[in-house]
Amino acid sequence: MSDPIGKHSRIYVAGGRGMAGSALVRALRARGYANLVTRTHQQLDLTDQAATRRFMRDMRPDYVFLAAAKVGGILANDTYRGDFIYQNLMIEANVIQAALEAGVRRLLFLGSSCVYPRDCPQPIREQYLLSGPFEPTNEPYAVAKVAGIKLCEAFNRQHGTRYLSVMPCNLYGPYDNFDLRSSHLLPALLHKAHRARRNGGRDLEIWGSGTPRREWLHVEDFAAACVLLMEKDAEPGLWNVGAGEDLSVGELAQMVMHIVGLEGELRYDASKPDGVMRKLLDSSRMRALGWQPATRLAQGIERTYQWCLANDVFESERAAA
């Protein structure tokens, strides 16, 4: 086993300004890790191989959390397929190779539950990876993420590294993307419900039939799981991180309406795709380490909505539209 992460270790959080990355920074600081390194995209373009290798060589971090990625909802994934596969392949290949060259002790790579097959037994276990076809709408993103997972596995086998990959369910929380053109389901519902209420509307439109079931985890609970994996010096490989329960898209939309105070009806746009009908992770390995999510879904959505209001998120999105 390698040495467990120390309080004075130099830790690089790639993507430290995003939703998951910023939650990791907060979680690490709360646990007493003070020697944290982050860079904005303007300061360091991780798709630039030479710049990434130079940064890692000069900084020499002990640990890396690779949270940087191009992410988006079903519409963005299906529209910008080339961007999603190219940028994610470049980011992960550059960072993981540069980490190896710089002698990084451990690296944690953020995957996604969307990489599992479209028609997968439920709950989804780690060994189901690549056991069937991807969901077509996000296939390029999934292919890129699987490449990152396999790169970690290949380096572990060839070079004796102890890189690991975490597979979160749908995450939500502060610093999410609330742009209706590219956001995931929950932030889009919050934005649409808020806009409807602000404009005097009553109804909320959702894509598809409302019957697909999804699992949601607050990003702070996810960050706590990632830090625990490093602190426990967890075995390399895949680690599912999920809430352990799911609900339908329609039920989620109704919960959002109640939290926002929108009193109306759901309207369904049947011309839009449903996507995968169910994605529920088996996170029993993570729970065996002593981790449990601390945030109930309704509580987490309420906190996220209040954060949006306090930071004028929806008003800034409207101004940018």
Image (cartoon, rainbow, N blue to C red):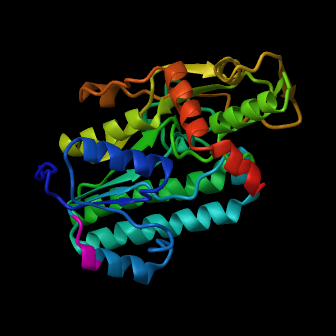
Is the residue 223 above or below the residue 262 in the image? below
In this rendering, the count of numbered labels is 0
Expressed as whole percent of the image width and height from the top left, the position of residue 150 reads: 41, 57
Answer with left or right where residue 70 lies relative to residue 249: left
Identity of the residue drawn at 18% across and 40% down: 232
- Could you say which is closer to the camera, residue 158 or residue 35? 35
Quadrant position of residue 223: top left
- Could you say which is closer to the camera, residue 316 or residue 67? 316
Is the residue 284 above or below the residue 30 in the image? above
Is the residue 11 above or below the residue 23 in the image? below
Identity of the residue drawn at 46% across and 71% down: 46
* Residue 268 seen in render: yes
Identity of the residue drawn at 70% across and 45% down: 315
- Could you say which is closer to the camera, residue 175 or residue 289? 175
Q: Magenta span: helix, strand or loop, mainly?
A: helix
The reply to whether the magenta stretch includes residue 9 is no
Expressed as whole percent of the image width and height from the top left, the position of residue 301 reads: 56, 27
Expressed as whole percent of the image width and height from the top left, the position of residue 177 reads: 61, 47
Q: Quadrant of the C terminus?
A: bottom right
Quadrant position of residue 199: top right
* Residue 207 seen in render: no
Identity of the residue drawn at 24% across and 66% down: 61
The reply to whether the magenta stretch includes residue 58 is yes
Answer with left or right where residue 100 lies relative to residue 167: left
Answer with left or right where residue 20 lies relative to residue 79: left
Expressed as whole percent of the image width and height from the top left, the position of residue 58 reads: 26, 79
Quadrant position of residue 250: top right
Q: Which residues are magenta?
A: 57-61
